[in-house]
Image: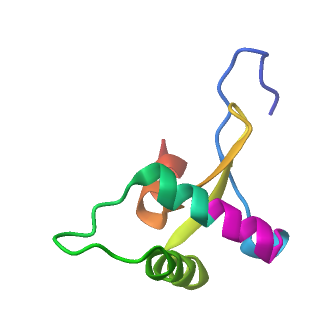
Amino acid sequence: MSYEENESRPPLEVPKEAISDEALRGIIENFIQREGTDYGREEVAFETKFNQIRKQIDKGDVKIVFDPNTETVGLMNTRDWQKLQKS
């Protein structure tokens, strides 16, 4: 399948084994900082958030995704990833 210069291309899943631990840490840290995730009434420590996301990646609940249109890497939950694959 070829794509025209201005045509949007679908994101690609990146296996966690394909990136270094250091790169994965950077992706997770960036996600936490960018998302400003609301954890309810009590503040959750950064390292706790990091560990929760890392476990979700390890279990397969969160995917590492490369967007070729913006040339960025991010995280996406499996449910949203599956919806994207169907569209």
Give how far across and how far down residue 76 sits, in percent: 51, 58
Looking at the picture, does residue 66 appear above or below residue 8? below
**Residue most extreme to the left:** 41
Position of the N terminus by quadrant: top right
Could you say where residue 54 lies in the image, as x and y percent from the top left?
Answer: 57, 79
**Which residue does the image show at 83% across and 69% down from the upper left?**
18
Q: Nearer the viewer, residue 73 or 43?
A: 43
Q: Quadrant for residue 60, please give it.
A: bottom right
Describe residue 21's horizontal placement relative to residue 26 as left or right: right
Indicate the position of residue 9 as horizontal and vertical percent values.
68, 32
Magenta segment, which residues?
19-27
Q: Residue at x 50, y 55 (%)?
A: 33
Q: Is residue 47 left or right of residue 1?
A: left
Q: Nearer the viewer, residue 27 or 56?
A: 27
Task: Please report the residue visible at 28 percent of the width from the left and 61 percent of the height from the top.
Answer: 38
How far across and down, in percent of the image, does residue 81 sit? 51, 56
Residue 81 visible (yes or no): no
